[in-house]
Amino acid sequence: MYWILFVMSAIVAVVVALIVGGLATPRDHAVARAIELPVQPDVVWTTIRDIAQYSDWRHELDGADVVDTDQPQPRWRETTSRGSMTFGITVDEPPRRMSARILDDDLPFTGEWCWSIEPSGDGTRVTLTEQGSVPNPVFRFIGAHFLGHTRSIDRYLKGLAARHGVPHPEIQDARAV
């Protein structure tokens, strides 16, 4: 009988710890990561803007479909085994800067990504910045302390690098400002 009480107390303690830890973790975050690619900026820009081809090089995606084609800026839906997210472009400055935000309002997080593309030597430096917000304290704690805020950015940059012939890129912390 005591073991049931012990197990129940342990479960409650873990839940309370997650909530308290989440409340102590900032709701908003900004992170930036960068890579160097051996191709010209316009080539990188074309890859980033070719949304319909994302699932060819972003292996975590089951699909990427352009939606709402009547909008002035593209909107697209990315589908993975865990569900889908819809994005809309907010800044479009070819071939050097693009921003897109999550349009879905039923997710446990929201945010925006900003791509910065700059010439660097004979190639290109790509910086990807995430400005995110996680209202739910449990998701916030798990995201910040177990998954990490750079996980999706790193996965994206690794796929982009592999698409341009760099199978093992050096991903740098670019410190969001």
Image (cartoon, helix red, strand yellow):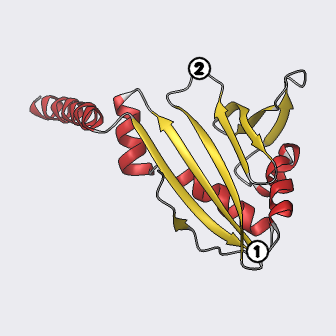
In the image, is 118 to the left or to the right of 173?
right
Q: Position of residue 53 (x, y in %)?
A: 87, 49
Residue for badge 2: 105
Q: Looking at the picture, how far across and down is residue 103, in whole percent?
A: 66, 25
Q: Is residue 50 left or right of residue 79?
A: right
Q: Nearer the viewer, residue 59 or 75?
A: 75
Report the residue at 41% width, 26% height from top: 135
The residue under the point 13% across, 28% down is 5
SS assignment at label 1: strand
Across and down, in percent, residue 99 comes to: 68, 41
The answer to whether residue 150 is seen in the rendering is: no
Is residue 28 visible in this depiction of the protein?
yes
Q: Nearer the viewer, residue 158 or 73?
A: 73
Looking at the image, residue 23 sits to the left or right of residue 68; the answer is left
| Quadrant of the rendered image containing residue 156 | bottom right
Type of the residue with mark 2: Asp
- Relative to 87, residue 171 above or below: below
Depth check, mark 2 against mark 1: the one in front is 1
On the image, numbered disc 1 is attached to which residue? 123
Binning the other alpha carbons within 10 Å of mark 1 as few (below 14), some (14 to 19) or many (20 upward) gives some
Label of residue 164 in the image: none
> Seen from this angle, which residue lies furthest bottom?
122
Among the two numbered marks 2 and 1 on one chain, the one whose residue lies closer to the N terminus: 2
Q: Quadrant of residue 65?
A: top right
Q: Tell me, yes or no, whether the two marked residues, 2 and 1, touch with CB atoms within 8 Å.
A: no
Residue flagged by tag 1: what amino acid is it?
Gly
Give how far across and how far down residue 125 sits, in percent: 68, 67
Above or below residue 108? Residue 38 is below
Q: Residue 42 appears in which quarter of the rendering?
A: bottom right
**SS state under label 2:** loop
